[in-house]
């Protein structure tokens, strides 16, 4: 009886110790994996940052090129050339299509046209949307 | 243990100790003594210093219209060490179209070699410039083509059946041999307009003329850098970024120039050049109250975007680099000096020797008797002006000439300005004072003459001409504002007012420049017709420098305009300032007044009626 008990104690599994080491192992593995994951994220984020930086630089360059083209096309010299060639960019209203309302509409804030007779008067400002 | 075994053990231990000592020494030698050398050697393999490009600032007019700007471009480079001999044809075929270079030429360039000191033989060149100043769009097209080719290679590699010959995994290496460097070219949207003021840059990016030169310090940005580590494929390892310095873009320079007025001036100078075919021409528009230069044009001129083959004469900013005898426009100096010194009053009469001043060998173009001080200017009497200067005396007159800014640089922020020339009184001959009073024996720049007239127009204060209005940083924040600078008072307000009143009559029916009248406005000004000297130093009776310098409106001048034409080919007998330069002033004045929104004060002449013309225009 006593022998059995003695063997039982001799062969007892040190669960607490195993558990401790297992925990330490798991923690170690977790820390290691975490480190690897973090490191990987660092690289992934770095690559994303780089990609965004490249895109930003490309956009900035496109912006600069666009700005130069705007400067060229809105320069005094260009305007002079357009005026000389008759192409100012303004679209002439054809004589057969004046903006004539059916009846006089007084837009709030617009002074009444002196001498207006009422119906079918031309408004002082053309091409302005009418507000009933 | 016997003796032999012990000895062997000792020997082994000693050998090991020696080995470890040697290795330790070598280790400390590598790690400590030669640490810097090996660190640098290792660094060279995977550390690179990237240059961060900084934009040069813009040049703008007073309203913000762009006059000069950087356009980003690329220099396409090949690294032949990464492009094998068998890949050259493929690389050349890809690049030929976008770059517009024949394939054979690219293949020839890719085959270039350089001698390697370490390898003691020729190796493929690592830096071959394929094309400079390539637009961004071309660079993007090349990248697109490379990406498509890589994708096709990858797809072919995956699709290849087992056992079949697959494209190598590192087929992308050759494309890594195509690189680019970001640079910029300077673009001038207005081409030849205002070319002498804006200036240009040399191949190193430094300004060599105009505002590009004088404001180079502000315009020039500071390039940044970043140390990076890269993998063996050349890709940056972002987490290992090293020391970094931010790039700072250059500041923008805003000029006092108004492109609306500049356009008027350019149109009129072109018209005058077409009509009179002068050797050179200059027109300056200034604000007399601030000294701001509103417009400036010279002929000949050149296109700022095309520098090759431009003759040196065309590059000269004649407004500040050319010295001319001003002629009668200079009479404002003697008159305002005599009035300021209260030697005379505006209505004081001066006997003009009936056109022949024998003592000074001086003539007028008409036989004038008594003329008031005002009439001396109106009729442009040489003898009258000479007598006013003689009454002042050599030294006092000289002091006034210098006071008006002649003989010294105006200080305008443009390169190459000359002093002009005025001799000191003790070097004058007896007749010198009479000649200087009428604008001979003195050399002035057109800008000096315009600045002097500004002093008369603003009530007697000499202002420093300004071409820079403001310097703003790349975010639009003001860095420096150039405020108007008074140089000195050169005439009393009363004297300036009297001269102004006389100058109004100059453009009237009795004066020398009725054609300078501006319909609807009261203008004022002075004509000048200076004979040029020939090679022997004598005055030539065939070649003239004709000018007109005036202001508008006379009551409260908004601008002073100088028109100067050197050797104008006018109709015989009409090569005078009032006849040639006066009408140019009138046209500029009319357009500029309308542009600036100046309300007309005078009745408009009936349509079709020409200005009164008299026979007194010979000046």
Image (spheres, coloured by chain):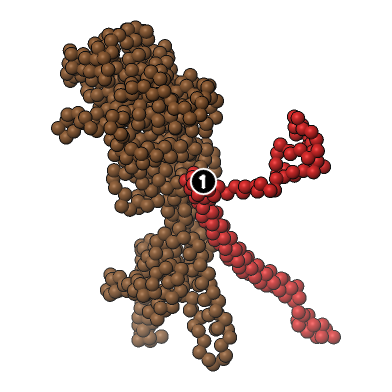
Crowd class of label 1 (few under 14; some 14 to 19; many from 20; radius 10 Å)? few
In the rendered image of this protein, does residue B448 appear above or below residue B254? above
- Which residue, as the protein is rendered here, is positioned at the far front? B608
Q: Residue at x 22, y 24 (%)?
A: B441
Specify the quadrant that holds the N terminus of chain B. Answer: bottom left
Foreground residue among A16 and B441? B441
In the rendered image of this protein, does residue B146 appear above or below residue B389? below
Rendering coords of residue B290 (x, y %): 45, 26
**Dot 1 falls on which chain?**
A
Task: Give the chain letter for brown.
Answer: B
Side (left or right) of B29 relative to B54: left
Rendering coords of residue B282 (x, y %): 35, 35
Which quarter of the picture shows residue B509? top left
Side (left or right) of B248 relative to A11: left
- Which residue, as the protein is rendered here, is positioned at the far left? B536
Q: Residue at x 54, y 41 (%)?
A: B476
Q: Residue at x 53, y 72 (%)?
A: B147
Foreground residue among B79 and B326? B326
Report how many numbered discs are placed on residues in the image: 1
Specify the quadrant that holds the C terminus of chain B. Answer: top left
Whether residue B357 appears in this view of the structure is: yes
Task: Give the chain letter for red.
Answer: A
Question: Label 1, on which residue?
Answer: A83
Foreground residue among B24 and B214? B214
In the rendered image of this protein, does residue B186 appear above or below residue B126? above
Side (left or right) of B574 relative to B61: left
The kind of secondary structure element at disc 1 is: helix
Whether residue A71 appears in this view of the structure is: no
């Amino acid at each position: 009886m006593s022998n059995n008990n003695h063997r039982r104690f001799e062969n007892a599994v040190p669960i607490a110790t195993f558990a401790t080491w297992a925990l330490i192992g798991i923690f170690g593995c977790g820390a290691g994996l975490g480190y690897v994951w973090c490191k990987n994220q660092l690289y992934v984020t770095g690559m994303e940052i780089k990609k965004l930086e490249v895109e930003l630089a490309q956009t900035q360059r496109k912006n600069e090129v666009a700005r130069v083209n705007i400067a060229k096309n809105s320069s005094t010299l260009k305007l002079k050339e357009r005026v000389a060639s008759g192409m100012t960019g303004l679209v002439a209203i054809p004589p057969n299509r004046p903006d004539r309302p059916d009846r006089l509409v007084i837009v709030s804030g617009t002074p009444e046209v002196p001498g207006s007779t009422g119906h079918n008067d031309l408004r002082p400002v053309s091409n302005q949307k009418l507000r009933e | 243990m016997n003796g032999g075994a012990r000895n062997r053990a000792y020997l082994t231990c000693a050998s090991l100790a020696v080995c470890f000592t040697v290795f330790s020494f070598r280790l400390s030698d590598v790690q400590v003594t030669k640490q810097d050398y090996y660190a640098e050697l290792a660094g060279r393999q995977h550390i690179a210093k990237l240059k961060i490009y900084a934009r040069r600032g813009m040049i703008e007019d007073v309203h913000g219209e762009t006059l000069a700007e950087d356009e980003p471009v690329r220099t396409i480079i090949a690294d032949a060490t990464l492009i094998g001999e068998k890949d050259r044809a493929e690389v050349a075929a890809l690049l030929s179209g976008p770059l517009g270079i024949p394939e054979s030429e690219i293949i020839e360039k890719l085959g270039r070699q350089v001698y390697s000191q370490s390898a003691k033989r020729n190796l493929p060149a690592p830096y071959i410039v394929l094309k400079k100043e390539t637009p961004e769009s071309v660079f993007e097209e090349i990248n697109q083509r490379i990406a498509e080719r890589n994708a096709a290679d990858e797809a072919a590699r995956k699709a290849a059946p087992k056992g079949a010959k697959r494209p190598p995994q590192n087929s992308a290496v050759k494309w890594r041999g195509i690189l680019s460097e970001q640079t910029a070219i300077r673009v001038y949207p207005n081409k030849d307009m205002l070319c002498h003021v804006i200036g240009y840059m040399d191949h190193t990016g430094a300004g060599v003329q105009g505002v590009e030169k004088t404001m180079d310090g502000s315009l020039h940005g500071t390039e940044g850098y970043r140390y990076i580590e890269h993998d063996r494929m050349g890709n940056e390892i972002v987490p290992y970024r090293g020391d970094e310095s931010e790039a700072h873009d250059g500041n923008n320079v805003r000029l006092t120039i108004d492109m609306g007025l500049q356009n008027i001036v350019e149109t009129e100078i072109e018209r005058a050049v077409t009509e009179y075919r002068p050797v050179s021409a200059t027109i300056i528009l200034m604000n007399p109250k601030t000294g701001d230069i509103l417009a400036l044009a010279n002929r000949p001129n050149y296109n700022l975007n095309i520098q090759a083959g431009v003759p040196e004469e065309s590059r000269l900013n004649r407004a500040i680099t050319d010295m001319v005898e001003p002629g009668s426009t200079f009479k404002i100096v003697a008159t305002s000096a005599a009035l300021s010194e209260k030697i005379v009053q505006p209505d004081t009469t001066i006997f003009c020797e009936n056109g022949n001043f024998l003592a000074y060998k001086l003539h007028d173009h008409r036989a004038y008797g008594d003329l008031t001080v005002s009439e001396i200017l109106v009729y442009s009497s040489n003898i009258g002006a000479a007598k006013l200067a003689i009454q002042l005396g050599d030294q006092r007159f000289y002091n006034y000439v210098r006071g008006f800014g002649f003989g010294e640089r105006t200080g305008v922020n443009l390169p190459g300005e000359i002093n002009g020339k005025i001799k000191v009184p003790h070097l004058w001959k007896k007749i010198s004072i009479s000649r200087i009073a009428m604008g001979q024996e003195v050399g002035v720049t057109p800008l000096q003459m315009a600045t002097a007239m500004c002093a008369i127009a603003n009530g007697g204060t000499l202002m420093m001409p300004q071409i820079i209005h403001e310097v703003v940083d790349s975010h639009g924040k003001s860095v420096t504002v150039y405020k108007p600078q008074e140089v000195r008072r050169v005439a009393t307000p009363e004297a300036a007012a009297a001269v102004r009143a006389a100058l109004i009559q100059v453009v009237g029916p009795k004066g020398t420049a009725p054609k300078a009248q501006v319909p609807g406005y009261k203008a004022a000004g002075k004509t000048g017709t200076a004979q040029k000297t020939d090679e022997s130093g004598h005055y030539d009776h065939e070649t003239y420098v004709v000018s007109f310098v005036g202001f508008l409106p006379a009551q409260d001048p908004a601008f002073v305009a100088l028109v100067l034409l050197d050797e104008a080919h006018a109709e015989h007998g009409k090569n005078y300032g009032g006849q040639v330069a006066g009408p140019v002033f009138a046209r500029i004045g009319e357009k500029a007044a309308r542009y600036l929104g100046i309300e007309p004060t005078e009745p408009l002449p009936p349509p079709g009626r020409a200005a009164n013309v008299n026979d007194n225009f010979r000046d």
